[in-house]
Amino acid sequence: MALKDFIVAAAFNGVEFPCAEASSTRANESKAHKAWRVPGADIEHTGRGELKIKMRAVFLNGITGAWPADVYPGLHDRLESELLERPAGRLTHPRFGTIDAHFDSWSETIDPATQQGVFVDLEFTESNASAFYPIAQAEQEPAAEMTAAAEAADTAVAAITDKLAPLSPVVSAQLDYLQSAELSAADAYGALAEVQAAAQAQLDSPLLAGSDAHDARAQIRAVLAQSWAYAERYLTPKPQSRTYAVPTVMSLQRAASLIYGDATKAPLLRRANTLPDELFLPAGTVLVVPDDA
């Protein structure tokens, strides 16, 4: 296959450029807390780390008829100027769509076997967690937002293909079921699972794998986000206040991790208990465990 068969369009601040390769890395951030006489370290999850993106731009004249004749040096120079003058901007990525990003570096390669241009390796850092689905805000009503997201997803998907079943009927039917009667937790979560399965099936479909389906995938992810928001608001059972006997020497943060499954909830235990040293809880210490809502 020719090089032009692998070229996709990318852009930064509206300046489109031909891209042959794109890779990304991401990770979770954490902080290790160590205490005297307490084995190991307590690992505090501090949030999702930023997305790092690498892209290989191909500035070769004649790669395809879709690009102007002056890819090199014309388009090459326009993009370079945009990146250097406005490094914080909007990156259009073949997989993540249009996201907030900072331009980090430009590495140019001249291939002696290729006389009609150059290859440029670009590096970006995502900002504002903009590459992933939106998280539902507390003041929003998840059922209405889920319905709106499903309608928007159906419109966006229909512009790409007519071979995928719409999400709106599934969302409507399951919300009617959820709101029709008092349900067990298993039944309620099962209804949301139907919505999530339908949305995930669309995300997994090869029909929505192209760069032209970015908007559709974003709306489908919004349906998923609102389904989780619905569960968190209406279905998540609240733990009752209770006590907990520390089984072995540990820190308060490790106790929070064992009790709540979340070490960041240690302040709840701190406020509810009088502790001489929260980094050293002797075995047998009885903690009052407050509601984590």
Image: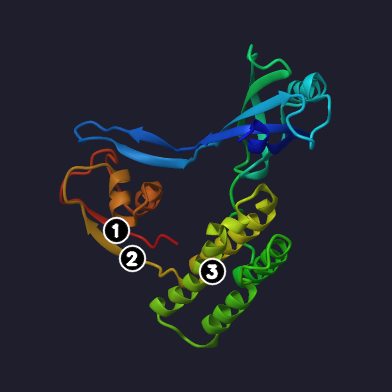
Q: Position of residue 151 (x, y in %)?
A: 69, 69
Q: CA distance from mark 2 to mark 3?
A: 37 Å
Q: Residues within 10 Å of mark 2 (few under 14, many from 20)?
A: few
Q: Quadrant of the C terminus?
A: bottom left
Q: How many marks?
A: 3
Residue drawn at x 72%, y 24% as measured from the top left: 59
**Residue 136 found in image quarter:** bottom right
Residue drawn at x 36%, y 60% as measured from the top left: 290
Q: Residues within 10 Å of mark 3 (few under 14, many from 20)?
A: some
Nearer-the-camera pick, 64 or 196: 64
Which comes before the other along the chain, label 2 or label 3? 3
Q: Nearer the viewer, mark 2 or mark 3?
A: 3
**Residue 225 found in image quarter:** bottom right
Q: Is residue 143 visible?
A: yes
Q: Position of residue 262 (x, y in %)?
A: 37, 51
Q: Is residue 137 visible?
A: no
Q: Secondary structure at mark 1?
A: strand
The answer to whether 97 appears left or right of 274 in the picture is right
Which comes before the other along the chain, label 1 or label 3? 3
Q: Secondary structure at mark 2?
A: loop
Q: Secondary structure at mark 3?
A: helix
The answer to whether 244 appears left or right of 6 in the picture is left
Q: Which mark is residue 241?
A: 2
Q: Nearer the viewer, mark 1 or mark 3?
A: 3
Q: Which mark is residue 288?
A: 1
Q: Amino acid at mark 3?
A: Ala
Q: CA distance from mark 1 to mark 3?
A: 42 Å
Q: Residues within 10 Å of mark 1 (few under 14, many from 20)?
A: some
Q: Amino acid at mark 1?
A: Val
Q: Which mark is residue 198?
A: 3
Q: CA distance from mark 1 to mark 2?
A: 7 Å
Q: Are marks 1 and 2 in contact (CB under 8 Å)?
A: yes
